[in-house]
Structures are given as structure tokens and as C-alpha cells.
Image: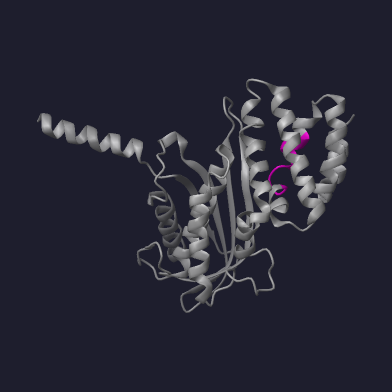
Amino acid sequence: MKRNLFLLLFIIASITCFGQELLCNVSVIAPKENLADKKTLKGLENSIREFMNNSKWSENSYNTNERIECALLFTITAVNNGVYTGSLQVTSSRPIFGTSYSTSMINYLDKTIEFAYTEFSPLQYMKGTYTSELTALLAFYAYYIIAVDNDSYSYMGGTPQLNEAVNISNQAQSSTSPGWKSTEKNDRNRYYLLNAITDDRNKDYRAAWYNYHRQGFDLMQQDVEKGRENVMKSLETLKTMHDANPFNLAIIQFFMVKPNELMNLFANAPTSQKQKALQILPDLDPLNANKYQEKIKE
């Protein structure tokens, strides 16, 4: 009896200490009627959800309440002989220390995905092996999501996961499915998304990402002014990078998730910081230039 109790406690402790990293919401939709069997799409959705949430992607320990909240939205536009074509929206967020507020981390649209799927076939992924397009796609984004999250907690903290994503990208170069190659017309595909933060020339971006979250927003519970000052320093780093390359995809992705957060932050800032923000933000994010002017009034 005591032995059984010990084993039960050991199992519970193991689950607590070595829990999976992701808490991933998955949706698979096909806007066109009769495009695909609804039962098959639901099976695909469930298989992806189980694959993302039940797989162990790193050696890091995650408690249940520490799992990374993320979402995958598959929009299927064509199905031919078991091959699914469409797009994938990837989003994730993370909590800000000492608050109930969560900040958006990723909002990326993978415009062209293509993979084969047979109902009831298990999804299996083996490191170092290109098993299938679907599992390669899912593993790639699992590692990318975790890497971006880890980078926000420690400088270059996501390097191990980025290395795994690079390995998957390299293995997928033989794939006939789109999204993996530098030679494609789409210069914002998976290859370029990954290259944007793994290129040595973008180390400053990862430093800015860390400072923005860990030294910026996480610090505000203790010292609002110091935290906001560090956010500004991160923006100044991005401005230097932007001046060198206005089409830097890492910076473009940054402003897919941060505009409203920055508007709210600097709307209540001292006049001197508002002035700095209005000098920097419209250049970094020209699509929202007017909104910055409206929301951050001196």
C-alpha cells in the first residue's frame, strides 16, 4: 500500500515538474462549404491539439500555470487527394510579472501551408528526421513559440529552441511544400521569419526583446518609471536597426503585436518621454503613425 502511494506521488511530482510547455488552442476551419468533410476536419483539429499540447519540446520544467498560451488557426482553402492547402495564423502571449495583464508575443500569418493528412493517422515527430510536412510545420512553430517566450525572460534564452527550428527548416529544404526556402517569392515565409532573429546581425533585436519584457514591463510593478525608461531604450535599439534596414522582418513582426500596448504605455508618460516616443514610433510603425499621434498627446 505504501509502495503504491509512493509511486502515485512520484508520478504526480513528475507531471508537475516536467509538464509540457504549451497550452495551445487549435482551430481548423474551411470557409467554403463542402470543401472537406467536417468530421475529418474535426479529427485533424483534435490530432494537432494533442500533438502540440502533449509533446515535450524542451528539457525545461513547466508547471501547469506556467504553460505558454498560444493558438493555431488553420484556414483550409483546398483539399485534393488528402493534401490540404491554406494558411495558418500563429499567436501567443505571456503574463507580465505581478499583474493580471498578458502581452502579445506573436501574431504571424503563414500565408501558404500545404500538407498531407489521413484521418486517424497518428502525428509523430522525431528530431533530426523530416517525417511529414504537417509534423515538421507543427514542430517548427512549437519551437518558435517557446523560443520567443524564453527570449523575453532571459537574454538569448530561446537559443536551444531556435536551433531546433533551424534544424527543422534545414531538413525541410527537400520538401515540395511552400514556406521553407529562401528562393521563394514570399519573403516573409518561415525561412525569413526564422532568419530574422537567428541572423547574427539581429542580436540587438533579441537584446531589445529581452529588455522590453524583463527589464521593462516586468519591472513596472516595482518601478513604473524605470520600466518605461527601459522600454524606451529597447525602442531606440529598434530605431537604430530600422535605420540600417527599414524592411527588417523582426521589427515588422514586433509591431504586429505591440502598437496598442505602446500607445497605452506612453499616453501616461511624462512629457519628455512622450516626445521621444512620438519621434521614434511613427518611423518604426508607419501604418499606425496617426494613431500614435492621437493617443500619445504631449
Point 48% across, 57% down: residue: 164
Residue 88, percent across and down? 58, 60
Residue 289, percent across and down? 85, 45
Identify the magenta region: 255-263
Whether residue 262 is in magenta: the answer is yes
Which residue is farthest top? 222
Answer with left or right where residue 2 lies relative to residue 18. left
Q: Quadrant of residue 277?
A: top right
- 46 w.r.t. 64: above or below: below
Answer with left or right where residue 231 lies relative to residue 103. right
Q: Quadrant of the C terminus?
A: top right
Answer with left or right where residue 184 lies relative to residue 8. right
Which residue is farthest right? 298
Point 13% across, 34% down: residue: 4
The figure's colour scheme reads one colour
Q: Is residue 36 visible?
A: no
In this orientation, which residue lies closer to the viewer: 216 or 292? 216
- 287 w.r.t. 273: above or below: below
Point 75% across, 43% down: residue: 237
Residue 1, percent across and down? 9, 30
Q: Is residue 281 visible?
A: yes
